[in-house]
Structure formats: C-alpha cells, structure tokens
Amino acid sequence: MASRPTEEVPSVHQPIEGPGEGPNEDALQFMKLLEDANQPYYEGCKHFSKLSVIVHLYHMKCLNDWTNKSFTMLLQFLLDFLHSNAKLPKDCYEAKKIIKDLGLSYEKIHACPKDCILYWKDNSNLEACPNYNLLGWESNESKGQQSTNASSKRRKKKAAKILRWFPLKPRLKRLFMSPETANHMKWHANGRVNDGLMRHPADSEAWKLFDSKYIEFSSEPCNVRLGLVADGFNPYGNMSTTHSTWPVILIPYNLPPWMCMKRPYFMLSLLIPGPTSPENDIDVYLQPLVEELKELWDVGVETFDVSPKKSFQMHVALLWTINDFPAYGDILGWSTKGRLPCPSCNYDSQSRWLRYGRKFSYIGHKRFLDRDHKFRKQKKLFDGRDDMRPGPITILGGEIMLQMDVVAEHVFGKKKVNLTNKRKRGEDALTVWKKRNIFFTLPYWGDHVLRYNLNVMHIEKNVVDNIFGTLLNLDGKTKDNLKACQDLKDMGIRSRLHLEKVGNDQTRMPHDCYHMNASENDGFLQVLKDVRVPDGYSSNISRCVKLEERKISGMKSHDNYILMQQLFPIAIHGSLSPEVSRSLIELSCFFRDICLKVLNVEELKALEKRIAVTLCELERTFPPSFFTVMVHLVMHLASEAKVVGPVHYRWMYPIERYLSRLKSYVHNKTYPEGSIAEGYIAEKCLTFCSRYFKSIEIAFNRPVRNVEESMGAVVMSMDVSKRKELSDKVRWFARYPDNEAKWFKRYVINGLKFRTKDFETIRKTQNSGVCVVTEGDATYYSVLIDIIELNYSNKYRYILFKCQWANVIRGRGCKKDDFGFLLVNFSRLIHKDDRLIDEPYVLASQVSQVFYVEDVRHKDWVVVVQTKPREVFDIGIKAIDDDEEVDTYMENVLYNVTIDDACDDANDNHAWARVDEEGTIYDTSLISEDEFPEQDFIDDEELSDDIYESNGDESNDDGSSDDE
C-alpha cells in the first residue's frame, strides 16, 4: 500500500507577501498569538513556550478538576517562584482569555427541562416555556428577591438545562491559518488520483453530483464539506446509572485519508445535556448549529489561507449524518419501529406480523432479485407466497419533502404517554413520519443523493448477536423457539419443523438444520477460545468464550467486526452442514468486502446482487423471527457504498473511541457536561501546542533489496580508481557487518509489532506470524524465531528475521479446503537446519503480518488470516494488489453453487430438520395451542424489544487507541 506522502508547508515566520489582499484581522490576531507562543517560558528555557506552559497547566486543571481559585493560586506561586522571568497570566481569568484567543470557546444556551424550546434569540427573554409553563432555571434565591429582567434573572440562578454550543467558524478558519493543515484542506481537489476507484468520499457519486449541481461552490477547493455525528453516552461509565449526554460532532472531509477520521480533527459542535436522551426533540438543540450552517452556505466567512497567503470567502456544506439506527430515526423523524421501519424502502417496506412471536418479521427479499430468478416462484421454501414485485425505488429528497409536508406541525417536548392511545396497524403509513426534519431547512439538503447513513458497525453487531444467539441457542437471544415453530405452522411452511405431540403430555420440537449438537458446539467454541491475534488487533476474544456454559458474551463492537469477518467463517465451516455454512460464510464475505478501504463501483453492483441472494438463502434456512430490521438493513449497505464511498468514513468506530475520551474528563458527577466541555477545550489546546511548537522526528521505513554475499569480495578486488566510481552505500556494504550483532525479542517496523515465537508463549496475543510475497507472486508463510540487527560500521543497520518457513513449494505444507480457506502445516518445513543455503532469513522491511488460527478438528493444520493494517492507505500513487489486505476464503466458491437446485417445492422436501437428532421434548401443558386473534393495535414499546441492542461502553473496544 502507498504510505502517506510528505508535503512541504510554509513556515509561520515567513513574511506575508504574495497575491491577494493579505491577512485579515483574524489572521493577524492569530499570527500575533503564534509569535507570543514562541516566546520561551522564561529566559533560557528551551523546552516550553509561554503558550505551551499555560495550555499544559490548564489541561491538568481540567483533568484533575481544580477549581478556578486553586488554579489562580498555582499561577501566582509560579510567578513568585520564578520572579519576573516567567511569562504567565496572573490568574485563571487571564489564562482563559488566552485559551479563547485560539478560537476554542463555547456559549451556554439555557433550555427547557422538557426539551421544548431554547431560551435563545426570540425566546431569550422568556421567563417560562410556552408549552409547559416551566421555568428554565432552578431558583436559589430567597422568596423576597425579584428581578424584572428574565435574562438577568437566569444569570443569577442555576439553569435547569444548559446546551453548550461551540461555534464552528473560528475552528474552520484556524485550519486554513495553520500551516500544518492549510495544504491538506485542499487535498480532495489537488491530491487525489482519479482512476475510477473510490478511496475517499470525494471519489463518490454523491460528491460529484453535488459538485455538478453547485458549480460555484465546487469551483473553490477551499470550501469545506462536513459530516455530522450524534450519539449518546453515559458520562459516568457506570451503565447502571441512567444518564445520557449527547455530543454532536462534525468531521471535515476535505482532509486526506490519513487525517480525515482522526481525533485531532473532530469538532465538537454541541453538547446536549442529560439526564435523558433528546430523542425526537433533538431538533430543538440542533437550531444553533443549523443556523450557523445556513450562514456559512449563504454568506460564508472571510478566511485567510496561509499556503498562498491570501484571503478568500469560505463556504461550508453539510454532506450527511452518521448515527446508529435509533438515533437515525430521531434525527430523520422516521419511525424505525412497526410495519415500515426501513427509511431506505420508505413506504414500500416489506414486513409480516408474526402471530405467536408477537412482532414483525422483515422478510421478503425475493423482490430484490433479478426478475427471472428461480427463488421468486418458490413458495414453500420461503413464506408461502410468490413475489414478482420489483425492488423499492430510491426516494429523492424532493419526494421526501412532499411526504413531510402532510405531517402535522410537531410540538416539541417530552409528553406523558397515554398507554390506552395505541397506534393502530392501519395507521402506520400515516404516522411513520414523526416530524419535519430540521436539516431540510438547509437550501441544498434535498439535493443530496444520500443524507443519512446506515452505520455498518451497529448493523454488523446486531447481526452477529442474532447469529450467535440462534446457533448457540442462548436463552433470550435465540430466534428459534416454540413460538417460532408455531409461526411456521401458522404460515403453512416447513412442515418438518412443526411441533409434534409425543404421547399425551409431551411435545417434540424438531431440531433445525442449523442446530449444533454438543460436540459440534464444543468444536466451534474451542476454535474461538484458542484464537490469539496480534497486539492491538482486537480485545482478548478468548475470554468472552465460556466453554462450560457454551456461550459467548461480553464482546465489544470491534470484537464482533473481527469475529464476523475473519474468525466466525473458520469456526463454523466444520460445525454445520456445507449448505448452511455456505450461506453464513457468504454473509461474512459480504461484510468483509463492504469494509474494504478501496471500492470499485462495478464490484459493488455485483455485491448488491449477491447479498440479495444471500439473504434469500438465509430466509430458506432460518425462521422468520430471525429477520429483524437490523438484518434487513444489510440489503442496503452495498447500495449506499456505491453512492457515497468507503464505509470507514461513515461508521462509528472512531466516534465511539472519541466518546470514551470525552467520558474520561468527567470528574464532577454533578456537573458532567461542564467537565466534558472544559476537558475538550483543554485537549484541543494541548493538541494545538504539540502540533505547532514541538519538533517531532518521523522515521520512514523503506523496503531494501537483498545484498549478495559475494558483493564484498567483488568490490575489494576492484582497482582503487574503479572503486571510487561506486556509491558510498556499496563501499560500506563491501566492508561486511560487524562481528557482533544485536538480538531482539520484539521489534516494531512498518507500523507492525513482531515478536519471536518463544517470547510470546505465555502471552494471550500472537505477533510471530510472517508472510512474504516474492517477485514471482509466490507467497510464503512462516513463524518468527529470531530477530537480528546487522550493523555496517554504525553507518547502515538492517533487521533480519529468522523464520521457520512452511513448505509451499510442492504443496506439502500448504493447501486450500473446499471453502477456500488457506491452511499451512509447520510440521512440514522447507528447511530444518541452520545452513545459510537454506535461507531462513528475510529483511524485516519485506514482510507483512499474519496470524494463525488453530482448529482442533484439523490436526497440525492452521488457518492463515491476513491482518488489516489501519494506518496504511492506498492513495493511487502506485499500482497495488487490490486483495493485498483481504483474506481469500470462498474465492471461486462463493455464489457459484446454490443449494438444492433440484428441490421439490410441492412436497416441501428441503432438509430443514436434522434427522440424526431426536429434538427437544417439552411438557405439552406449557405450550398454548390457541391462536392469537388478529390484533387491532401495535404497541411500539413491545415491538422494540429485540429490534436493536445498545453497544454499551465502547471505550478502547479493540484494545488500542484511535491514534495508533
């Protein structure tokens, strides 16, 4: 993969000359701040500047919850201690003024406790909200005190709820006034390679269509595109404490891939207070941000660009939002429960009410298939119905606005729910819109091809929970139960899975084809229990596997990501029949392919068709209750990626890690949002100082070619005149390395950590897997046993890896199974001696990392899993192998075989039940045979039990920070 290129940026101290009108007032103030910041802390100080000391002290104040008084006392002590040499503010107030000059500050806006209004703009002088007549503060005054002015009264009293708004303009301007980021903000226009592949949102159809619609906006490369993320979290870290704080974060997409989704460039815009989620009333709190976005689109803001040293009028556009599915519904205003939960399908959603399961099943994926596909006419294999309908058509922004026009004016605010006023099934189509979305007030919002993104992270986690709960038959998690069997009978399908009476007082539930017996279950879990992955790749998945209880629990979202795409296919293909395994592995392949960093539109079109077939095959295997709305949303992921590009710019893994950082700033539990705001400002100031006033040396590791042993002798035999014609490097190599070499147990190179096999025997991680691709495209796999450094007279140093290489030459130690999994056998090596002719060594710069998964069901053979480097991006500078970072299982096997090509539809002859097992026996008295009548109403609270599950605390869910 091509690594990050270096760019030359202008110095801060260069004189402001060149084209344009020069720096504006804001830029001059910023330049003055940089000059002050470069002043030493005191005369003779070499390591700290005036600004860096203030920022470090302020950061410690926020982290340790110092009071303003204690901070002032510390500053005064330092001034007295260093006499007049120290360049420090005299108190906390002056320190905060300096921090504010960096453009990092926020405004407090009072809100109604019921979330109905903000005391802002036209409402700033109100004493109470007009909907509930509630005061906007908690009074601490005596009864005799009165104030005639509502705003002054609010200043003297403790506010009941405070929204913290971080203005966007000064932070966007600072990106162009700072030499470290100014050039990068134009990378989307000047740095991309246009070869038809999608590596960045700027390569997507959505970006290009927006540019063609608004030519004036796109003609200026400095104009900014943003993404918006809103998500709730518990600031206390204790999930038993009910509290939900909602940050709204903006992401600038002008930046290149290696900067775009990184924490230093996340911009906290709003901090919505708890203790309850704003839910549908989030539009009330979004008002300040939306007003600012309108102004930045219509008017813009004058900004100085330090790279060409001229001012320009910067405009800003919001591209889309990123949320988990519940927040998706709250922001869009679409009801994500009930009969029509899918915003992508809109009013053409397909669902079926399960009479015994008492919930909706979102089956019917046959309509996404090609018109002539055989599945469309197979009734008994699916839901008992033919389906020749076309798939749903994508709804454009104008049509959505027309749909919302018929929605009654929504009155914001938390209301008491009348439990007797339940929504009737026939009214679903009329009440699916809950409000008119506030983002449609932006002039360009309706012209976007896609406005709200489905979060792959959240969908994948819920799909994994569904699969594991059902396969392992976990109580409360499985979708295969007595009610599911009764629903099958009610639908008139899969007769072999219907309940059967055994005697007078017992009933037998047949085991489905995906049911694992005890030995199969143990083998499946043992593979996952024995897994060891490289450091930082994921958390310790083996600790989540409970062999005695035969279950998996306690996994984070990133663990589900690794499990679904890499480990689950290895574990499952030996525990279930090939027909069932193939469908589940196909689903794993889909998630693997959709999460690639480089996407091809034609391949995404094929993937869009393939996932429709996969979901239909799953419909033939699993009960209808398996298909929650989260499983259905998988159908739309390829379509979205085809329009807006790679998913790692639109998922919430980095956001969840960022929220854990915000959570760490909470020390005052009675004032969590205030602590988060102060901590965020301190962090941004510290990042600013470390970026511009600290020298950081970056070492680049470049591949080096092998040097032949005979080169030294050849060079030394040359004439002196000819020897002088050689390069210095060749002459140094001719002297041979030093007689003494360094030996390491571990080494980090190319962003990867390697360890020797012996050194990691007592560890829970595996960093000894090595892979090398030769010039002839032959791939060799090995285990690292020694790390040696060669030193050429302290001029050149090279790291050699000594490895045990599996014999892949004649295929004795390497093979592929029926599913395409690559297996190697380290009991069959290329060489077993230490002879140099065996060439056990390889340059560390030439290797990539893999890890091996043991399977007790295949003695001596291990499955090879390719690691996916996070901080390596293909930016199109050189040709690469598109499959370099991807496992190759199921290649040439995937979708070439369809199960039961000759199935007998009329006789319902599909092998749904396991004939080798008796099934589960239940007491007949515990099973109700009475059919539920058709219901006249649907309770949304009842329906939402298993539609989606929260991710919990996602702090460092992969065992690493987001800055690795």
Image: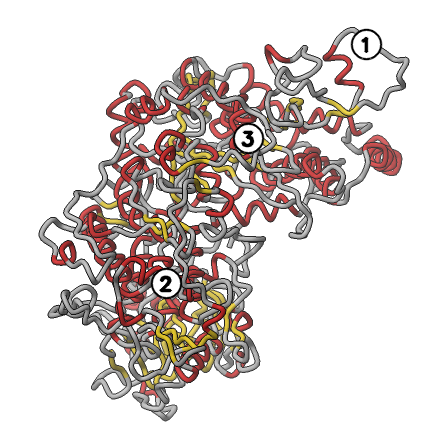
Q: Is residue 789 visible?
A: no
| Secondary structure category for the residue under label 1 | loop
Left or right? Give the position of 307 relative to 778: right
Q: Amino acid at mark 2?
A: Gln
Residue 478 percent location from the top left of the image: 44, 65
- Residue beneath disc 2: 486
- Residue beneath disc 1: 147
848 or 360, nearer to the observer = 360
Please report whichever mark, 1 or 2, sits nearer to the chain's N-terminal start: 1
Residue at screen point 90% across, 13% down: 144
Q: What is the spatial separation of the Cα atoms under label 1 and label 3, in whole angstroms?
A: 33 Å
Q: Nearer the viewer, mark 1 or mark 3?
A: 1
| Secondary structure category for the residue under label 2 | helix
288 or 274, nearer to the observer = 274
Left or right? Give the position of 321 relative to 697: left
Neighbourhood count class around disc 3 (C-alpha, 10 Å): few under 14, some 14–19, many 20 upward: many
Q: What is the spatial separation of the Cα atoms under label 1 and label 2, in whole angstroms?
A: 68 Å
Residue 902 sits in quarter: bottom left
Residue at screen point 68% across, 32% down: 39
